[in-house]
Image (spheres, rainbow, N blue to C red):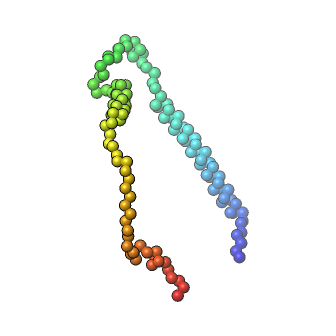
Amino acid sequence: MTTLTVNGFTWLVTGVGFGMVIVLLIVLIFILMGLGAIVSRISAPKAPKAAAKAAPAVQASAAPVQGKESDEMPVAAIAMALHLYFNGVHDEEPTQITIKNVERSYSPWNSKLYGMNNLHR
C-alpha cells in the first residue's frame, strides 16, 4: 500500500496557488469596475449647449418625416399582426394524426446478439 507523503513544499505550492487565484480575482474585479466607470462616463448624455437652448423649439408635424421611424410604426405593425391572426389569415393544420405500424423483418445488422463479446469459450 502506498502512502502519500505531504511535506512543507506541498503546502507552500498549494498556498501560493490559492493566493494567486484570490489576488487575480480581486485585480480583475477592480479592472472591470474601472472599465464600467469609463463606459458609463462615455455613454452618459451630454449637457446641451447654450446655442441649442437659445433656439426656439420646433413643433413636430403630424405627418411622419420620410426616412425616419416614427413612434407609430411598431404599434401599427403589432395591430396588423393581431388583425391577421384573429381574422384567420394563417394556415389551418389538420387535427388527425395517423400512425403507421411498419413491420421490420429480422436483420443481423440491428441484432444486439452479434455485438456482444463472447468471452467464455
**Total count of labels:** 0
Considering depth in this image, is 90 or 38 the residue closer to the camera? Answer: 90
As drawn, 90 above or below 8: above
Residue occupying image coordinates x 29% and y 22%? 65
As drawn, 8 above or below 36: below
Q: Position of residue 34 (x, y in %)?
A: 54, 37
Residue occupying image coordinates x 28% and y 27%? 67
Considering depth in this image, is 97 or 82 the residue closer to the camera? Answer: 97
Q: Position of residue 105 (x, y in %)?
A: 37, 73
21 displayed left or right of 66: right
- Which quarter of the picture shows residue 66? top left
- Which quarter of the picture shows residue 17? bottom right
As drawn, 61 above or below 2: above
Q: Position of residue 46 (x, y in %)?
A: 45, 24
Q: Position of residue 48 (x, y in %)?
A: 43, 20
Tell me if I can see residue 77 in this picture.
Answer: no
Residue occupying image coordinates x 38% and y 53%? 97
Considering depth in this image, is 15 or 40 the residue closer to the camera? Answer: 40
As drawn, 2 above or below 71: below
Q: Pick out the residue farthest to the left.
A: 66
Q: Pick out the residue farthest to the bottom.
A: 121
Tell me if I can see residue 46 in this picture.
Answer: yes
